[in-house]
Image: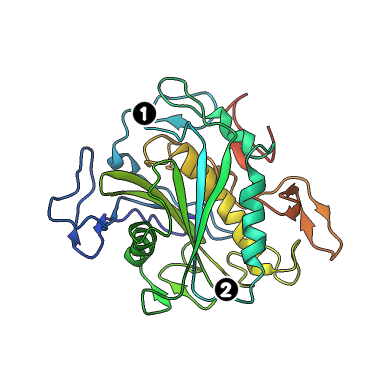
Amino acid sequence: MRIGLASTSIVALLLGVTTFAPGAGATRPETAPPNALQQLDHVAAPLRGHDPNGVPDQAKAGGGPARVSSNGIDYHGGAVMNTGVKAYVIWYGNWTTDTATTILPALLNGIGGSAYYNINTTYYDGLNRRVPNSVTLAGQTNDAYSQGATNLSDGQIGSIVSNAISSGRLPKDANGVYFVFTSVDVTKSGFLTSYCGWHTHGSLSGTDIKYAFVGNPGSNPACSVQTSASPNGNVGADAMASVVAHELEESATDPGLNAWYDRRGYENADKCAWTYGGTYTVSNGSKANMALGGRDFLIQRNWVNASGGYCATSY
């Protein structure tokens, strides 16, 4: 979910072609070029210090009546990513001197198989096929300001993803989650004022593509919990790591925005946003709560869909 202040479900955009109203059974118009990514409603992760925004019309993406559980989060009939996640990264902007390019891949390489990501195995689809504890960093590519500006719209994030796929720099993968990471000089409508990141999905030449936006907040306190020191010595990258984990687990359990969320529209990570549980101190005096990929991180907790439901950093 968009980590935000106000409800931000938006109408879908057929990027670069025409506007498109989302809804159950919606299809890509035949006039769309093969590299146009049709974005459906997207949801975001809340700013630090603010409650997650609800998504009252989230079910427009095709969810059925909720199957009410006793764990504080309900199933709405949609698919989950039940064969594992392949993570793809698009580094947008200028990252030449930013150590984020080693920090965030370490997170994505280390999160699969962890006790933390194992929380997602408590989520399943209508055939009881569960989200496996499997994440693979499957590809990375650079994008040096292809949109011609540093102030991006939602539609331009979709264009960045579709261009990376249509150019062959990344494969077209229905089992992937494509992360657009923007460098600290890049601004984005709503970023740092309404949300810290978001995830969505769309159709690209008949393939359902899941993708997410996570910007580099630098030391902005809206999205950076530790603003002077952080576990990996890069405040912006460490802040991004927590949001990446948040959007990754929501993409796995609610990829079509019609599977798992509660009566307020909160997805699993939203229910635990900006809470961390027990922490420990690393050598530079900053705090962390888990080690992944050989590095320490301070990562938001996730909602366990079992035993009545609770926030945790492991399962």
Q: Which residue, as the protein is rendered here, is positioned at the far right?
A: 283
Q: Residue furthest top?
A: 127
State the image coordinates of residue 226 (x, y, percent, origin top left). Answer: 71, 65
Q: Nearer the viewer, residue 170 or 50?
A: 170
Tag 1 residue: 77
Picture coordinates of residue 199, whole percent (x, y) = 44, 52
Q: Nearer the viewer, residue 184 or 32?
A: 32
Q: Residue at x 40, y 22 (%)?
A: 126
**Residue 303: % across, % down:** 59, 37
In the displayed structure, would residue 236 be above or below residue 289?
Answer: below
At mark 2, the secondary structure is loop
Q: Quadrant of residue 161?
A: bottom left
Residue plotted at (31% across, 44% down): 207
Residue 197 % position (x, y): 49, 59
Whether residue 79 is visible here, answered yes or no, is yes
Rendered-image quadrant of the C terminus: top right
Task: Name the residue located 64 percent from the left edge and 73 percent from the top edge.
Answer: 98
Question: CA gap, disc 2 to disc 1?
Answer: 40 Å
Q: Residue at x 19, y 59 (%)?
A: 19
Q: Are marks 2 and 1 in contact (CB under 8 Å)?
A: no
Q: Residues within 10 Å of mark 1 (few under 14, many from 20)?
A: many
Q: The residue under label 2 is which amino acid type?
A: Trp
Mark 2 vs 1, N-terminal side: 1
Give the residue type that dot 1 points to: Gly
